[in-house]
Image: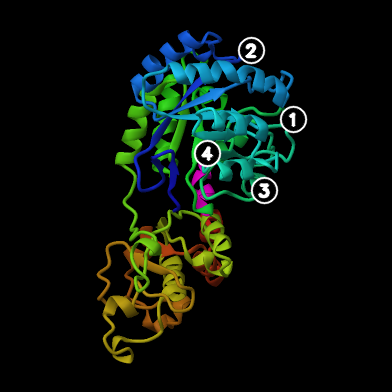
Amino acid sequence: MRNVDAAGLGIGDDHPPRIMGVLNVSAESPYDPSVYDDPGEAAEYVDEELIGEGADIVDVGLESANKDLEVLSAAQELERLDTAVETLESTGGDAVWSIETRNHEVADEALSRGFDMVNDICGFADPEMPRVCREHDAAVSKMASPPDLERPGAIEDVDDIYEALSRNGFTDKTILDPAFGGWSEAKTHADDRETFHRLREFRGYGRPLLVSINRKSFLKTIAGRTTEEALPVSLAATSMAVERGAHVIRTHDVAETRDAALVGAEFTRDRVDTGPAETRGDDTVTVEELDVTTVREAERHLDRLDADRSVAGDAVVRTYELGGLTDEMIGALRAATTVQSTASDTPGASAVGTGSLAAEATGAAFAVAGVDPEATIPPSAADGGSPDDRRPVDRSDADRGSPPRAGILVGTPAATAGVKTAVSGVSNALDAALESIDAASR
C-alpha cells in the first residue's frame, strides 16, 4: 500500500486514520452548522470545532454538492476563494488545508495561496488537474465520477466505480474516494450499501482511501433516522470503514468520528508489511499481506500488477459447517475430498495430510464431526466401497435410521465448486446446500 505525504501528514496503512473536518463557504450548502461566509467566524469554527476536536485536515467547500443546484463555474468558485484564504490565514490551529473543487484553475490558485491539498470531486474530469497537483507537489483526493465537470460523483453502477477512479491516471500523491451519496437521481441507497460492502475492493489500486459517509442517507434509512438523529449510524459505519481499510474519514462531527475511527483502527487485523524495497536495500525481499476477502478483491490486485488473474480463485478460502448429513452424503463428500493414497505412499506425510483433511482432486477438505481423523472410517458405496465393506447395522438402527451428522467443508470457491460437481445427484438436499455457497466468495 502506497503511503501519501500530505504537507507532512502521513496517510496510509502505516499511519493512524485521519479525520477531515468540513467547512463550507457556500450559503446554499445543506448542512448549516458547517456553513460560514464571514472569515472571522469561519476561523473560530475551524479552531474550536474542527482542529480543536481533532481534525487532521480541513476541507473547504466553495459550493454545495446538491445535485438540484446549478454547478458553479471556475470563475464563480474563484470569487469565493478569498473567504476561504482569509479563513486559513486567520486560524491558529495546525492542520492540512484541502480545497474542494473540480477545476484546475481554482486548485492552482488555492495551492498558490496557502492550501496544501485538493479534493477533486470530479475525479480528474478536468485533465489538467493532475498536472497542477504534481507541480505543487500536493496530495489530491480523487472521487469516482463521470468524465463530466457537470456531474460530480454520478456513477450509477457500482461495477463502474473502479474504472472511474483510474480515469486520467494518478499522481504519486493520489487518494481515492469511491463517492458515497446521492450524486444523481439514478443512484440508490442500495448502490451505496453495495459500495460500502465492497470497500476493500478499492484497495486494489494500492492507494489510500477516503470515505465521506457522515450522516449519509444510505445509513440513515437503515435505522430510520433523520439527519439530526443520524450520528450514531455514522459512527458505526466509520469504525467499519476503517476496519475495512479506509484511511481518511470526511465528517462534520469531528470529535465523535475521531473516536469511532480509533476504535476501528484498534481492531483492524495486523497485516504483514516489511515496507517498500527502496527503503530496505536492493537485496531485500519485501512482503505485504493484501487485505483480500473475495475473489474480486484478489483480481483487482492482480490487475494492478498485470499478473495472471486466474489465480484469484485460490486467494480466498471459506469454511462451512454442513448439518443434517446422512451417511450417504458423508461418503460422497469424503470421496470428493480424500487423497487416494496412504501415509506410506507419501514419505513424511501424516494421517491427517493424506486422510479426510486432504484434497487432491478438488482441492477442498472435509472433516466429519465427532470422528478421530486418524481412525478408519468404513467406506460407503458412494466413496468406492462395496456393500460388504459397510459397518454392520442392527435392526433397531435400520428402523430408526442413522441420526443426521455434521461436518466441516473447507476450500476455495473453485474447490467447493468442484465438490458440488463431484457429489451432484447424491442428494437433492446436498445439491441445494452446495449450490447456495458456490458463489459466496465473489
- Residue that mark 4 sits on: 196
Helix, strand, or loop for circle 1?
loop
Q: Residue at x 38, y 78 (%)?
A: 379
**Which picture quadrant has residue 5?**
top left
Report the colour scheme: rainbow
Q: Which mark is first along the chain, 2 or 1?
A: 2
In the displayed structure, 239 sits above or below 416; it is above
Q: 140 or 160: which is nearer to us?
A: 140
Q: 156 or 324: which is nearer to us?
A: 156
Q: Which mark is first along the chain, 3 or 2?
A: 2
Q: Position of residue 419 (x, y in %)?
A: 51, 68
Is residue 298 inside the magenta stretch? no
Q: 350 or 283: which is nearer to us?
A: 283
Q: Are marks 2 and 4 in contact (CB under 8 Å)?
A: no
How far apart in space, not on screen, are marks 2 and 4 (Cα)?
28 Å
Q: Residue at x 58, y 44 (%)?
A: 135
Q: 156 or 10: which is nearer to us?
A: 10
User: Which residues, given as a range, are shown in magenta?
Assistant: 196-204
Type of amino acid under label 4: Phe
